[in-house]
């Protein structure tokens, strides 16, 4: 905060002297030195104020973009960590904010108002052509579908065009904008909602040396994902943690013997 204020002050001083020196050099050709000095001083003050206002405006815009970027990253992370029920709940809240009637079923979140099935494909998984075909087969006559995911590969986008506009793809950015416009952000991660039902099996894996490769693969996956997301800290930390766990298991856990 202080560094930002100091930078603005220095920018203001720089703007003042630039305008003052240029004005004095030009006005001195027309007016006596005293008048040129007073006029240049006045123009320098105006230039200083104008420059500071521009810098503050640009700084505010920059901070807003950064804030939005962090919010987008946390929103995508939340959706990827949420269980399916919670993901559909977010969709339900979004549609109901548009006064649509929504019914949740095994197919997804179905909007009775627009006859559209919303399918969510978050959870750090890619959407495949099989997912599109499966969704299309879920549709009844006159129904359409919307598939929401963080990203879509180009071949998936092209493949979706084969369904005659009955399947629409909404990526993470477009989904984020809709949630933001509906004032449904930020999303919160409730530990109870993302708790794995098979948690005991996961922790039992810590006693099994065969789990080393899975922790290693998981760590490498998170590190690889850090190259494709705006906010890298989460992925780097988790990737490093999983790799460290795999090393500890390799060094200190005795191998189990299959009977």
Image (cartoon, grey):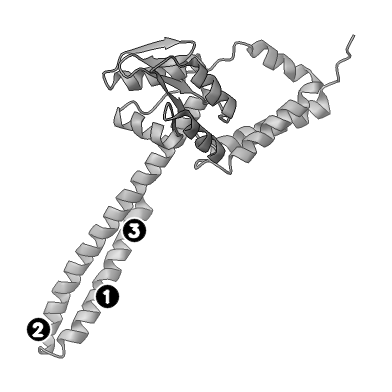
Residue 95's spot in the image, x, y percent? 33, 20
The residue lying at 29 percent from left, 58 percent from top is 55
Assign a secondary structure to mark 3: helix
Q: Which mark is residue 18?
A: 1
Q: Is residue 154 left or right of residue 204?
A: left
Using the image, tell me which numbered label, if any, was put on residue 240: none
Label 1 to label 3: alpha-carbon separation: 18 Å
For mark 1, give the secondary structure: helix
From this viewpoint, is residue 125 visible? no
- Residue for badge 2: 35
Q: Nearer the viewer, residue 115 or 171?
A: 115
Give the mark nearest the N terminus, 2 or 1.
Answer: 1
What's the CA distance linking mark 2 and mark 1?
A: 18 Å
Labels 2 and 1 touching (C-beta < 8 A): no
138 versus 123 height, above or below: above
* The C terminus - image quarter: top right
Of the numbered discs 2 and 3, the one sitting upstream in the chain is: 3
- The answer to whether marks 1 and 3 mark residues whose Cβ atoms lie closer than 8 Å is no
**Residue 215 in sight:** yes
Residue 80: x %, y % from top left: 52, 26
Q: Which of the 4 image quadrants contains residue 181?
A: top left
Q: Nearer the viewer, mark 1 or mark 3?
A: 1
């Amino acid at each position: 905060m202080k560094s930002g204020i100091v930078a603005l002050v220095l920018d203001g001083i720089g703007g003042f002297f630039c305008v003052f020196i240029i004005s004095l050099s030009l006005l001195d050709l027309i007016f006596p030195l005293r008048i040129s000095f007073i006029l240049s001083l006045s123009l320098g003050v105006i230039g200083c104020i104008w420059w500071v206002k521009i810098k503050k405006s640009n700084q505010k815009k920059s901070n807003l973009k950064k804030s939005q970027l962090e919010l987008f990253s946390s929103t995508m992370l939340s959706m990827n960590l949420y269980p399916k029920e919670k993901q559909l709940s977010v969709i339900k809240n979004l549609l109901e904010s548009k006064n649509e009637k929504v019914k949740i079923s095994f197919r997804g979140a179905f909007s009775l108002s627009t006859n559209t099935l919303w399918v969510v494909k978050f959870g750090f998984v890619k959407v495949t052509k099989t997912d599109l075909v499966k969704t299309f087969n879920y549709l009844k006559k006159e129904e359409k579908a919307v598939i929401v995911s963080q990203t879509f590969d180009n071949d998936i986008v092209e493949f979706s065009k084969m369904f005659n506009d009955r399947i629409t793809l909404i990526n993470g950015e477009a989904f984020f904008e809709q949630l933001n416009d509906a004032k449904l952000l930020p999303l919160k991660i409730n530990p109870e909602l993302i708790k794995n039902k098979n948690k005991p099996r996961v922790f039992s894996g810590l006693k099994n040396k065969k789990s080393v490769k899975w922790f290693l693969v998981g760590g490498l996956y998170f590190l690889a994902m850090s190259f494709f997301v705006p906010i890298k800290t989460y992925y780097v930390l988790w990737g490093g943690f999983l790799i460290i766990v795999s090393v500890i298991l390799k060094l200190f856990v005795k191998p189990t013997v299959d009977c």
